[in-house]
Image: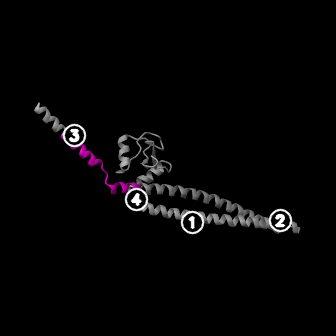
Amino acid sequence: MRTALDQLYRLQDRIRFVQTRERERDAVPAELTEVDRQFKEKLEAVRDLKGRLTEAEIEHRRAAAELSEMQEKLRKYQAQLRSVQTSREYSAILNEIDGAEKLVRGTEDRVLALEEEIETAKGEILELESRIKPRELAEFRRLVEKKGGLAIVRVVNNSCSACHVKIRPAALQILKAGTEIVTCDSCKRILYWDPKTS
């Protein structure tokens, strides 16, 4: 009986030793969690800025096309002004020219504002990218290119919000701990754990 008790005691001792070591292994230093959180925030900020930049560039092209069209109308009205016969026609064309000039000025202001927004966004992107490690940034850019602009996705109900595949429990624990970057097993995007929404 004594031998059996000794063996059970030794077994319990080993089990407790393993549990203690597992707790130590799973305990994440606060600094590491904070670094990971900041990294993920930076990556998300880069993604948001790039989205804003793309929208601003599209709006800029649209505004530039409108401006070109309005300038053409203005030239046409100015040409018509030279061939008017009556004061009523003259007054009507002057009104058209005045309206077109106002539209041109408004559109020019919009184009300038969009150009400023584009430049600001590009500067912010460069600043954010300079704070991210080159290897991680290269992987992020590769994913952005490959995944149509969506490299990082939130975990919602323990699933990838892009492809809706459930995250493995072990991967979920690593993700929650914030010790390393975790990618979705299915779509290979970087997973982002937000305790408020995940």
Mark 4 vs 3: CB contact within 8 A: no
* Comparing labels 1 and 3, the label whose residue is closer to the camera: 3
Identify the residue under disc 3.
15
Q: Earlier in the sequence, mark 4 or mark 3?
A: 3
Q: Is residue 50 left or right of residue 166?
A: right
Q: Is residue 32 above or below residue 96?
A: above
Callout 1 crowding tier (Cα within 10 Å): few <14, some 14–19, many ≥20 = few
Q: Secondary structure at mark 1?
A: helix
Q: Badge 2: few (under 14), some or many (20 or more) residues near its Cα, within 10 Å?
A: few
Q: CA distance from mark 1 to mark 2?
A: 36 Å
The residue type indicated by label 4 comes to Ile
Picture coordinates of residue 11 (x, y %)?
18, 37
Residue marked by disc 4 = 132
Q: Is residue 83 visible?
A: no
Q: From the viewer's side, name the closer residue of 93 and 183.
A: 183
| Residue indicated by mark 1 | 116
Mark 4 residue element:
loop
Asked if 96 appears above or below 174 in the picture, the reply is below
Q: Of helix, strand and loop, which one carries label 3?
A: helix
Q: Nearer the viewer, residue 170 or 70?
A: 170
Q: Main secondary structure of the magenta part?
A: helix
Instruction: Judge the density around disc 3: few (<14), some (14-19), many (≥20) Cα neighbours within 10 Å.
Output: few
